[in-house]
Image (spheres, helix red, strand yellow):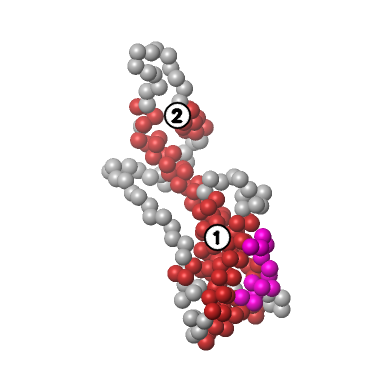
Amino acid sequence: MAQYVNNKSLLKAILTYRELLANGDRKSTAFRRAENEMGGAFELIAKNMLRMPKFYKKYAFADEMVREGVYDCAKYAHNFDPKRSENPNPFSYFTQVCFNAFIRRISKEKKDYRTRQSLILQSGIIDQVDVTQEGDDTVYANAYLSYLKEFIDTHSYNANVETPVITEKKIVVAKPAKLILNNVGLFE
């Protein structure tokens, strides 16, 4: 498997895909080949973007970033118009789509992180945690508890920012994101 995306072959796959889609020929091997080539290129773009210094080894949710990048490339591929310029460059278009998906994911994770921290703060769990052991008067350090206390002390919460309020004890289980390129609207 190639380690880079060939711009000319990606453009050729997109043009083939559009032509066969316009003719209604979705069952042909050429159509499937174009789909697979586009999907592989989208995945390579997203995975290689993680090597950028801005994203390199910084985020624990890198897999989600790649998934969202590939998903958005497939979702917005119909917006790429090779006729808009003399030298169409699908690589740069899809790189920008991935970049935007990465930034959106990072913003979402930061928002979720702040939500979790504010929920911990509101719940009062920090005051309930006992770091002593039975029969021992020594106070043991809890690294996570120390981190939470430091976070709360150093970050002032803006009163204008909405913080979630615990109204009832309810566990919400998030469904895992499905990454099936054939269901994103591009291959319909």
Circle 1: element type: helix
Span of residues in magenta? 1-13
Q: Residue at x 39, y 40 (%)?
A: 119
43 relative to 84, above or below: above
Q: Is residue 149 visible?
A: no
Q: Cα distance, mark 2 to mark 1?
A: 35 Å
Q: Residue at x 61, y 53 (%)?
A: 50
Q: Exactly how many numbered labels are in the figure?
A: 2
Quadrant the N terminus occupies:
bottom right
Q: Residue at x 49, y 74 (%)?
A: 187
Q: Residue at x 66, y 52 (%)?
A: 52
Q: Amino acid at mark 1?
A: Gly
Q: Amino acid at mark 2?
A: Leu
Q: Quadrant of residue 129?
A: top left
Q: Position of residue 151 (x, y in %)?
A: 49, 33
Q: Nearer the viewer, residue 128 or 61?
A: 61
Please give the residue where the numbered disc 1 appears in the rendered image: 69
80 relative to 165, above or below: below
Q: Quadrant of residue 163?
A: top left
Q: Neighbour class for label 2 at 10 Å: few (<14), some, many (≥20)? A: some
Please give the residue where the numbered disc 2 appears in the rendered image: 145
Circle 2: element type: helix
Residue 3 in magenta? yes
